[in-house]
Image (cartoon, helix red, strand yellow):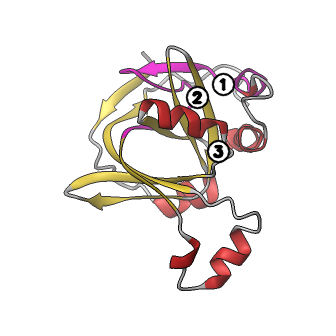
Amino acid sequence: MPFKPVDTHLPAFNPFEKFGSEWALLTAGDSRGVNTMTVSWGCLGVLWNRDVATVYVRPQRYTKEFIDRTGRFTLSFYAPEHKAALGVLGRVSGRDEDKIARVGLTPIELGGDFAFEEAELVLACRVLYADEIDPKLFWDASCDERNYPEHDYHTAYVAEVERAYVRTQGAAQEGAL
């Protein structure tokens, strides 16, 4: 297996850099199908005495259907050479084409959750709470105006980080993107 389990308390991990600049893939699915999308908004922290990841998914995203059906997702983080692939996965819908095959990522199952062999780090998460962002609750109206011109408010998913995996040495995919 190209991954090994590690403690979820990750040393030298900067979530601001990982989400905001490097991006991540949010992947959800089961035996009936898997979909993935790029995320650049997210949080890692502690809530309800648990290690959690919070992600934000717009209602029109195909991956949302998979999260809502399974109550689970993975967050996976990649080396910089995969940034172009993550860009495609953020723009193209899995409803319209096999975008995973298009970018050449290799799906892998990790304890019933799905990610990709090319990832450097995978967090397996179980949804604890979900709620749609309420525009009436913005204290700064510019957040609404700038990010929601179509009024397609994200669902915020708070999920317990149950497991973490890092890619083992020598598991890099040949011909990586």
Q: Position of residue 165 (x, y in %)?
A: 38, 33
Mark in front: 1 vs 2: 1
Of labels 1 and 3, earlier in sequence is 3
Question: Residue 138 at x, y = what percent?
Answer: 54, 79
Secondary-structure class at tag 3: strand
Q: Secondary structure at mark 2?
A: loop
Q: Which residue lies at the image location 80% right of the left edge and 28% below the top edge?
A: 96
Q: Is residue 9 above or below residue 126?
A: below
On screen, 158 above or below 85?
below
**Quarter of the rendering occupied by the N terminus:** top left
Residue at 58 percent of width and 85 percent of height: 140
Residue 38, numbered circle = 3
**Picture disc at residue 172:** none
- Report the disc number at residue 118: 2
CB contact under 8 Å: marks 1 and 2: yes
Q: Are marks 3 and 2 in contact (CB under 8 Å)?
A: no
Is residue 113 at all visible to an observer of this figure? Answer: yes
- Examine the image and state in which quarter residue 176 appears: top right
Instruction: Give whichever of 170, 177 is nearer the camera.
Output: 177
Residue type highlighted by circle 1: Leu
Is 166 part of what is drawn in magenta?
A: no
The residue lying furthest to the left in this view is: 49
**Residue 102 figure quarter:** top right
Q: Residue furthest front?
A: 136
Asked if the magenta segment contains residue 121, the reply would be yes
- Distance between the alpha carbons at the discs numbered 3 and 2: 15 Å
Q: Which residues are magenta?
A: 100-126
Q: For residue 105, which numbered disc appears in the image?
A: 1
Cα separation, mark 1 vs mark 3, equals 13 Å
